[in-house]
Amino acid sequence: MCGIVGYLGKKSATPILLSGLKRLEYRGYDSAGICVLENGALRTFKKEGPIQMLATELEKQSLDSQIGIAHTRWATHGRPNEINAHPHYDCHHNIAVVHNGIVENFEGLKILLEKEGHKIVSETDSEIISHLIEKFYKGNLEQAVLEAVRLLEGTFGLAVISTSENKLVAARRGSPLILGIGPDEVFIASDASAIIEYTNQVIYLEDNEIATISESGYKIESLDGHSINNQITEIKWTIEEIEKSGFEHFMLKEIFEQPKAIANALRGRIKDDKIKLSVNFDSKKIDKIIITACGTSWHSALIGKYLLEKIVGIPTEVDYASEFRYRSPIVRENNLLVVISQSGETADTLAALREIKNCETLGIINSVGSTISREVKSGIYLHAGPEIGVASTKAFTSQVASLVLLALYLKEQISGQLDKDLSVELLTIPEKIQSILDQAETIKEISQNLVNAKNLLYLGRGINFPVALEGALKLKEVSYIHAEGYPAAEMKHGPIALIDKNMFVIFIVNHGPIFEKIISNMQEVQARGGRIITITDTKDATIEKLSEFVITVPSVSEELSPLVNIVSLQLISYYVASANGINVDKPRNLAKSVTVE
């Protein structure tokens, strides 16, 4: 879960590498480092902490180089410090490596290398790679990298330079890497945001591929030596889309981008009384749906279960991707496996997809060209635009909107009838979300009451139980306040013991058949002194009486209610964290794209 940047061309490498690191900081920010080849020597600078620490150090240097590699780290093996920061050297400082991933057999390799006299100075698994390359180096860096990575078990995306050759070598297995192609220059990056300022022409390296970049151009081979001619893809979004555009944080910007993001997710897909999706299977043959995902995407998957079972009538299971692949799941030919991932690179979700070979697969993905998007048989792109904030917001609502589309599509394909009322109402959701965003200042005022809270409960029922889970996760992620989401009826089975005069409880209350039931749950909380904040679409005297604060959202069909209810919870999380002085775009211990298991 780290960021890699590499450059070889005719420009000064250092500002390009540093700019790329800044754009990748959401992938990791424990430490950062840069290494350039200058006058036959490798010059390396590393700093613990945010990238600005490294930038300040580089301002003192005068570097004249047109080739280099750089890295921003999210620690897996070894503490965040300068020794463990990348790049890592071999024994003689002739080879430098940056690495994203986990080398699962590094302990055994370390013992082997130390027996051969190699001096390992860091606590990381990544340093092993530089010493393996040194072990195999016989005048050809590409060949040495090939031999080294053949010994690695686990995942890697890596870039390598050497004092002996004016070239970059990159290799990938399980951790994303792309090449950016410009006039007389080639870039390496973990994702396109690092290099979009310089080129929108990219090549996505596949697993078990190695790229060699020199002054004469680039070549790509498989790890068994076969030449590969990968297609160049054009990135459609621009540098402006990954700027803050006047907002204090990316998270707030992306919350406010949700009307546009959902409109983009729906554009062209509800047309001429039909749902149009890029689906390559016979919907009538599907007898079970399995959805797998991680984190926020898992919460959207839970909403998807409600949608698919209610609208389509197909039994649907939801699994954490990290558990799915290890529990001997029963998947049959007529099943549909749906994988959900904002980045399209989530390691556990990708591994779950690769475990299943015998059924139809469909991805709900935001990042065009990502690994999952290339490996599923069918796909729905979110078109939400780049999401930089670590805490996912617009991707979540775009996923839910896409799951509504999928449910409508399957119903239409199976029954021959479009649910016109729901599809027309779905198109109104962007303006309804905007009406909630217009209440942001009021929600901000309410949020100030939670700044000193230690614990919160989020309670919802039915399709809004996953919204309670997601609201609690958002608060935990960015404010570091403990919060739990529960089905409201389950409160009596344990969590009610936590209720006292210091406990805030956020209820999600929508009109419908279980309205009276959740009112009873609210009364149980009030009777024990709990302080209630209610998100509701209903003007009701009882709600007003039971609640300390009420946030009113537009009334929509039950199937669409998660899309309006979550926005207030996202804003609450943001404003609580911001009031506590937390940088919500870089919450501690978290990284945006979890590309290691």
Image (spheres, helix red, strand yellow):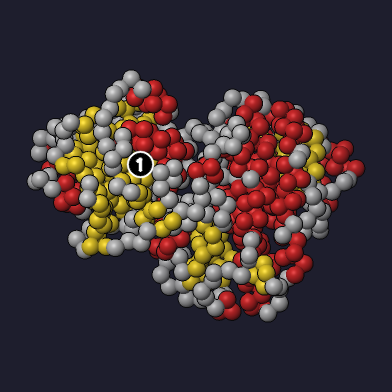
Asked if residue 442 lies left or right of residue 398, the reply is: right
| Vertical position of residue 299 compared to residue 9: above or below | below
Which image quadrant for residue 115?
top left
Asked if residue 535 lies left or right of residue 265, the reply is: right
Asked whether 13 or 333 is in front, the reply is 13
Point 45% across, 38% down: residue: 23
Q: Where residue 374 sits in the image (x, y, percent)?
A: 42, 62
Asked whether 395 or 68 is in front, the reply is 68
Q: As shown in the figure, which amino acid type bears the numbered disc 1?
A: Ile
Residue 502 in view, yes or no: no
Asked if residue 556 lies left or right of residue 575, the reply is: right
Residue 37 in view, yes or no: yes
Point 22% across, 50% down: residue: 216
Q: Where residue 442 sits in the image (x, y, percent)?
A: 77, 34
Point 53% across, 35% down: residue: 585
Q: Where residue 148 sits in the image (x, y, percent)?
A: 19, 48
Label 1 packing within 10 angstroms: few (<14), some (14-19), many (20+)? many
What residue did someone put label 1 on?
4
Q: Where residue 268 sits in the image (x, y, percent)?
A: 63, 65
- Number of disc labels: 1
Q: Report helix, strand or loop for mark 1.
A: strand
Point 68% across, 79% down: residue: 416
Asked whether 499 or 383 is in front, the reply is 383
Residue lying at the far top in this picture: please name it.
Answer: 60
Which image quadrant for residue 97?
top left
Asked whether 106 or 163 is in front, the reply is 163
| Vertical position of residue 526 compared to residue 520: above or below | above
Q: Quadrant of the N terminus?
A: top left
